[in-house]
Image (spheres, rainbow, N blue to C red):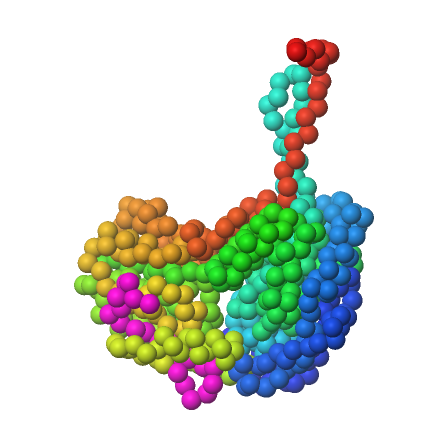
Amino acid sequence: MSNLLTHEEYSAIANSLSFPTNAFINGQFQSSKSGKTFETINPATGNVIAKVAACNADDVDHAVIKAREVFDQGHWSKLHPSERKKVLIKFSKLIQRNLNELAVMESVDSGKPVRDCATIDLPETIECLLWHAEAIDKVYDQTAPAGEDALSVIVREPVGVVGCVLPWNFPLLMMAWKIAPALATGNSVIVKPAEQTSLTALRLAELAIDAGLPRGVLNVIPGMGPDVGEPIGLHADIDMVSFTGSTETGRRFLRYSADSNLKKIVLECGGKNPAIVLDDAEDLDLVAEHIVNASFWNMGENCSANSRLIVQENIKEALLEKILAHLRDWKTGDPLDPSNYLGSLVDDEHFKKVCSYLKQDNILVGGTTEKPNYVLPTIVDQVDPDSKIAQEEIFGPILSVITVKSFDEAIAVANNTEYGLAASVFTSNGKKAIRAARAIKAGTVTVNCYGEGDMSTPFGGYKHSGFGGRDNSIHAHDQYTELKTIWIDLSDRAPEESVD
């Protein structure tokens, strides 16, 4: 709590904010070409925050033209790597300087607890930009063993114009995960924020220009999915799309690519992630702390949330007792009060979806509150692993408890899902930990903890959870570049004559 302001101080910042509302194209704010707007709502209060430009395909076309122009001119794409690094470092410093403003703006726009925005989302956004900035002048091209008669050089070149389509659950952080490696490798970028959470993306674009990013390199186009997301996916002059969101929408971007220019597609989609607790797990109190954080952090609006607790039967009751004890500290309420661990769900529609999963027997704790868009941390016991609540991604603060008898059954239940994003396993047996980590079909498996790794580790999924690449790490740089082989003939021999 030492790095946090008071409830009163955060509320004062919220009352003084000036919200960006227009599209950001070619280094300046401008209204949508149609002149239309849409309301963005504070989900915690139901109040209208602002009216944001409702863009469409005409605005996308305009942004692509400007992004392509600056890319071809080379003001960013051909800038010396060390110069690009300096700009991104300055960008991260400007975000740090405006941390409290951005944290409050994020909280008001999304319903996220300001404590998380200020202590997790913003610091990790800054770290992401710095990490990729520092990697810019440390990634070497290669030569291949071509012998004495040739020189084979393998170089990476920026893809070109990249579309980044963002989710609403981590607006700032997901924007950083995408634009940091895309900009680091020299691309021009067009960001489509989720319509529920457009404000911080627009503010970040403004700060990027202040940091020295050339105009047209970073553009933000707010609007609805069919009006902006689909035109980005179908645009013949966008070279790549990186998308984070639902698996259903991810499938659409694969179709858009097939129906247009076969642009590269990278998808990070849903998850129904298991936390396996074996009966030899040490320190059940610490395990319970991890389970609570994994299940309810960010109101469960987290693709890597451990929403399925798979626990061996002889320790289940002891573990649940400790989980319920830790849950008492997770207060739900006003997102601008830093004492609250949970805020509101992102909007009315999502609230209704999450509530539809609360019609269950064996609810140990939780449910809805009298205030709209608030759901308490909820634990459902004795869940059938094949049931709807155990198979579908809820994206809310609901933990399903599934009891198993053995290690092999735990692994089978963990893999009994169309998703494969993340998983956790808790055991004191090293061999079991390694066997589980290898057997679980997921992009990230944590042992005796919950997490996603750090900025140096790739993040993405198996099966319906991912496609085409990974966020974070140096692997993210690879997906925003094209590999080119340059073959140089060094021999003195004349080319052999062809034989008819």
Q: Quadrant of residue 191?
A: bottom right
Instruction: Name the magenta segment's main secondary structure.
Output: loop
Q: Is residue 222 left or right of residue 342?
A: right
Q: Is residue 229 left or right of residue 341?
A: right
**Residue 466 to residue 219: above or below:** above
Q: Is residue 371 left or right of residue 260?
A: left
**Residue 164 to residue 468: above or below:** below
Residue farthest front in this picture:
500
Q: Is residue 373 magenta?
A: yes
The x, y position of residue 392, in whole percent, is: 38, 65
> Foreground: 285 or 75?
75
Assign the C terminus to one quadrant of the image: top right
> Foreground: 292 or 423?
423
Q: Quadrant of residue 117?
A: bottom right
The x, y position of residue 164, in whole percent, is: 62, 58
Q: Is residue 160 magenta?
A: no
The residue at the point 47 percent across, 60 percent down is 247
The residue at the point 74 percent across, 75 percent down is 35
**Residue 138 to residue 401: above or below:** above
Residue farthest bottom in this picture:
370
The answer to whether residue 289 is visible is: no
The x, y position of residue 303, in whole percent, is: 46, 63
The residue at the point 78 percent across, 47 percent down is 72
The x, y position of residue 145, in whole percent, is: 59, 23
The residue at the point 29 percent across, 66 percent down is 387
Count of numbered labels shown in the rendering: 0
The answer to whether residue 246 is visible is: yes
Q: Which segment did they paint magenta? A: 368-388
